[in-house]
Image (cartoon, rainbow, N blue to C red):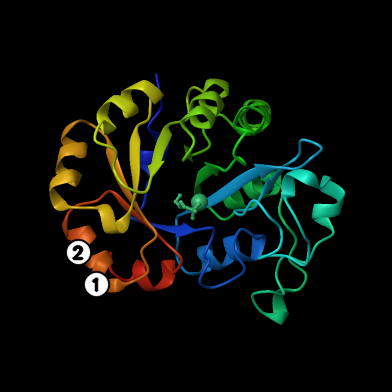
C-alpha cells in the first residue's frame, strides 16, 4: 500500500529544479533559494555517473549548466564533482557543485521541504539508473520522508518504485495519452504530471474523479497559474516559487 504522506503535505506550488528562476538549477543554492522564497516542496532531477553515483542534474550533457563537457554518464563522480555548476547562471554562484542525491535529501529535509524526485535516465540506461537510485533510497531514505518519485520513463518509474514501495509514484508526460488511466494503473502511479499547454478543465476533473492527483509543469506566468488553480489542479511546478507562491 502506497503511503500518501507526500500528498497529505503537498503545497499547491512546488519549486522546479529547486528554484530555477532564482538560482542555478539543481544546486544546493537553488534548494535554499526555493526555501527562502517560501516553497514547501521542490522538484529535482536525479541521474547517475559512469561509476554509478547518484547526482542531481537535468540534462544528459554537462555543457549547459557546468564548465564540463559531454554526458554525465560518461564521467566519473570525481570529475563531475570538480565542475563549476553555478557560474553559467551568475558569477556569485561559482562555488556551486553538482549535488549528490544524499546531499539533496539532507538539505531539503533540513529546510523543511518535501521532495518530488524525478528519475532522469539517459535513454537506454533506464534500468541501471532505476536500480542505483532505488537501492540508495531503500538504504538511506528515512521512513517518513515526504517524497514523490516521478519519471517520463515508465520503465524507470516502476523499477525505482519496487525498491521503495511506500513512496508514491508520479507519471510524467507532455501530452496526455488517450489510455492515461490504463497507464496509471499499470505503473501504479498516484499522480499525473502534465505539461501545461495540454491541460484542460475537463481532463483535470476526469483524472481527479478517477482518484489521481493532477500536477502541472512548468508554469511561470501568473495568469496561466491562476487559471490552473481555478481549475483545481493539485499542484503547479514553477521556476519562480516566490512569484507564484503569492497566488495561493
Ligand atoms: O517534473 C516536472 C518537470 O521537471 C519535467 O520536465 O524536463 O523539467 O525535467 P523537466
Ligand atoms: Mg524535472
| Residue nearest the observer in this picture, 89 or 92 | 89
Circle 1 residues within 10 Å: few <14, some 14–19, many ≥20: few
Give the image quarter of residue 52: top right
| Residue nearest the observer in this picture, 194 or 108 | 194
Residue 246 image position (x, y, % from top left)? 32, 71
Residue 1 image position (x, y, % from top left)? 39, 18
Q: Please determine whether, in this image, residue 118 is positioned above or below residue 24.
A: above
Q: Secondary structure at mark 1?
A: helix
Q: Dot 2 corresponds to which residue?
A: 227
Residue 155 image position (x, y, % from top left)? 51, 28
Circle 2 residues within 10 Å: few <14, some 14–19, many ≥20: few
Q: Is residue 122 visible?
A: yes
Q: Dot 1 corresponds to which residue?
A: 223
- Report if the CB atoms under discs 1 and 2 are less than 8 Å apart: yes
Residue 226 image position (x, y, % from top left)? 22, 66
Question: Distance between the Cα atoms at labels 1 and 2?
Answer: 6 Å
Q: Please determine whether, in this image, residue 63 is positioned above or below residue 211.
A: below
In the displayed structure image, the side of residue 170 where residue 67 appears, left or right: right
Amino acid at each position: 500500500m502506497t503511503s500518501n504522506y507526500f500528498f497529505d503535505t503537498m503545497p499547491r506550488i512546488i519549486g522546479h529544479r529547486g528554484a530555477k528562476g532564482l538560482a542555478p538549477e539543481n544546486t544546493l543554492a537553488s534548494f535554499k533559494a526555493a526555501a527562502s522564497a517560501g516553497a514547501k516542496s521542490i522538484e529535482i532531477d536525479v541521474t547517475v555517473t559512469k561509476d554509478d553515483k547518484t547526482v542531481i542534474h537535468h540534462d544528459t550533457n554537462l555543457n549547459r549548466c557546468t564548465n564540463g563537457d559531454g554526458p554525465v554518464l560518461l564521467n566519473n563522480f570525481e570529475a563531475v564533482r570538480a565542475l563549476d555548476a553555478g557560474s553559467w547562471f551568475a558569477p556569485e554562484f561559482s562555488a556551486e557543485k553538482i549535488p549528490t542525491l544524499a546531499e539533496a535529501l539532507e538539505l531539503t529535509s533540513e529546510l523543511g521541504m518535501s521532495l518530488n524526485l524525478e528519475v532522469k535516465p539517459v535513454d537506454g540506461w533506464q534500468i541501471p539508473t532505476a536500480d542505483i537510485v532505488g537501492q540508495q533510497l531503500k538504504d538511506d531514505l528515512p521512513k517518513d520522508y515526504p517524497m514523490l518519485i516521478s519519471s517520463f520513463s515508465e520503465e524507470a518509474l516502476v523499477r525505482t518504485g519496487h525498491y521503495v514501495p511506500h513512496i508514491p509514484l508520479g507519471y510524467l508526460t507532455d501530452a496526455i495519452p488517450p489510455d492515461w488511466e490504463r497507464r496509471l494503473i499499470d505503473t501504479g502511479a498516484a499522480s499525473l504530471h502534465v505539461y501545461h499547454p495540454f491541460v484542460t478543465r475537463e481532463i483535470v476533473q476526469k483524472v481527479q474523479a478517477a482518484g489521481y492527483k493532477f500536477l502541472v509543469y512548468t508554469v511561470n506566468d501568473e495568469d496561466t497559474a491562476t487559471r490552473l488553480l481555478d481549475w483545481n489542479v493539485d499542484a503547479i511546478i514553477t521556476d519562480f516559487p516566490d512569484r507564484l507562491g503569492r497566488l495561493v
